[in-house]
Image (spheres, rainbow, N blue to C red):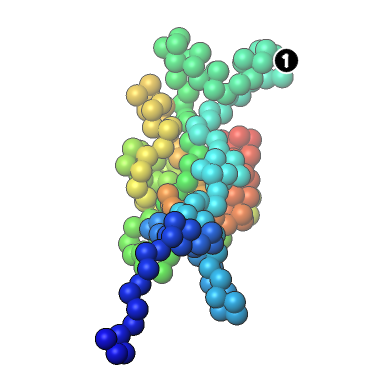
Amino acid sequence: MPGQSPAAEPASDAEKKPAANGIAALPIGGRIKVDPWNDQLRMLKSKPVGTLAESEKMPFEVTPFVLYLMRQGEHTSTEAASAVAAAKRMAAQGKAPDFVFAVDTFVSADSPLESRRFADAILGQGFVVRAVDNSNIVPPNLVQKLVQLSHAGNIAVQYGVTGGGNDGAAFSSFGSTDVALGWPLRYSHSPGEVVDVRDLEALAKIIAAAARSW
């Protein structure tokens, strides 16, 4: 018929194959880069990944530790010098340390959307005495003792209530008093956790001060 286009011929096998640089489908969560100058699409990665491993989020981890004091020349073995080994040995003998100082994070509400009625510890304003958490309550007189010790050593200190527990609470069943310390942590248990190094430095100073004069 006049004006009718000729019938399309069947495509060959070569024409049926997609182009080598074509992307048939993109996975959910995929990342692509678009270059508007040459209309090129480039896959960057198929899914988001964390920037840090869990073990790399904090510079150090000490939980719990026990102050085990001895006179110079006594119990010179490596085992006796180890706080953890001393705690195990005392527990096996039916004894328990008077105090256990657990070091853990203090999950903080220091973020724009959180209420300051709970876990109110500000990053950059010092280490935190975990006065109350889900596993332990530090006696008020010991909280005050830590605050006074900090002020005497010009160490920035905070105290507060937070969620979660600390490993030192396990020693409470042996009669020990758990004195939990920590540093304020923003966005806990997320890839974007934030900590202030000044708080870690204050924590290290109070640990040294408590070891000397507790």
30 and 208: which one is in front? 30
* Quadrant of residue 94 within the rendered picture: top left
> Which residue lies under the disc numbered 1?
73
Q: Residue furthest right?
A: 73
Residue type at mark 1: give it.
Answer: Gly
Residue drawn 54% across the image and 40% down it: 55
Q: Secondary structure at mark 1?
A: loop
The quadrant in which the C terminus is found is top right
Residue 46 pos. (x, y %): 47, 54
Vertical placement of 98 versus 191: above or below?
Answer: above
Residue drawn 43% across the image and 46% down it: 130
Residue 193 pos. (x, y %): 49, 54
| Side (left or right) of 207 relative to 175 | right
Residue drawn 56% across the image and 71% down it: 40
Q: Residue furthest front?
A: 1
Vertical placement of 5 versus 133: above or below?
Answer: below
Residue 125 pos. (x, y %): 54, 60
